[in-house]
Image: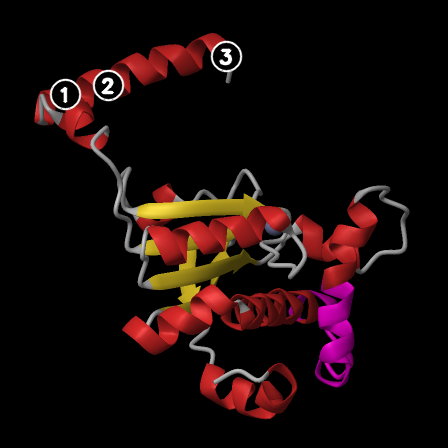
Amino acid sequence: MNIKQIFENNKKWVSEKLKIDKNYFKELSKGQSPEILYIGCSDSRVTAEELMGVQPGDVFVHRNIANMVPNTDLNVMSVINYAVSQLKVNHVVVCGHYYCGGVKAAMQSADLGILNPWLRNIRDVYRLHRDELNSIKDEETKYKRLVELNVQEQCVNVIKTSDVQKAIRERKLTVHGWVFDIHSGNLIDLKIDFDKILEGISEIYHIT
Ligand SMILES: [Zn+2]
């Protein structure tokens, strides 16, 4: 892959789109009204649009290391605010993936500089689910489960935001926790029972 090739690919892509619809880019420039906000990992193997088979305009995308939704991260919080309150998406997806380097790094003791505070959020997930995770003897299975539980906790962080709370009440916005299995290419819906999870914590967060 070289940079020159990318611009050649782009030219080819433009002509292919125009062959199907000569107004394609004219229409695209009019605005966006995506149905979905996708929060995923920056991992180069886990694309957003390609693995979902969606087109430009379909999905509002945010990616960071290990698909995190820290409550104090201005970046992800701005994305959620804009997507939910302005673009009025009806679905918010947090998509993790097995073999996530960020999740793996979080559980190792190496000093990773600026990444330390970012990845510490994943250690918090481990601490919250320590009993379940420690009971898993196989290391690979344990990491896979931590990836899933991290998705679950980041979904809870999404639900805790006031924009999402409001949208759930007003238009039944739905939050989804997914995992992409790099090993098979399959997208897995974790079918997380948020009602049950939130029931246990609503007294702390005052979530309605
Ligand atoms: Zn990752």
Above/below status of 22 relative to 96: above
Q: Element under label 2?
A: helix
User: Could you tell me the amino acid type at mark 3?
Assistant: Ile
Crowding at dot 2, Cα within 10 Å, few <14 / some 14-19 / many 20+, comes out as few
Queried whether the magenta region covers residue 136, the answer comes back as yes
Residue 146 vs residue 184: left or right?
Answer: right
Which residue does the numbered mark 3 point to in the structure image? 3
- Write the start and end of the magenta stretch as one range: 122-141
Q: CA distance from mark 2 to mark 1?
A: 6 Å
Across and down, in percent, residue 56 comes to 28, 37
Does 196 sit above or below residue 134?
below
Distance from Cα at disc 3 to Cα at disc 2: 17 Å
Label number found at residue 14? 2
**91 and 191: which one is in front?**
91
| Main secondary structure type of the part rendered in magenta | helix
> Which residue lies at the image location 36% right of the left edge and 78% below the top edge?
169
Q: Nearer the viewer, mark 3 or mark 2?
A: 2
Q: Identify the residue under disc 1.
A: 18
Of labels 3 and 2, earlier in sequence is 3
Q: Are marks 2 and 1 in contact (CB under 8 Å)?
A: yes
Q: Nearer the viewer, residue 206 or 139?
A: 206
Badge 1: few (under 14), some or many (20 or more) residues near its Cα, within 10 Å?
few
State the SS at label 1. helix
Which residue occupies the foreground of this view, 61 or 9? 61
**Picture quadrant where residue 184 is located:** bottom left
Where does the image place residue 196, in percent across and percent down from the top left? 50, 90
Q: How many numbered callouts?
A: 3
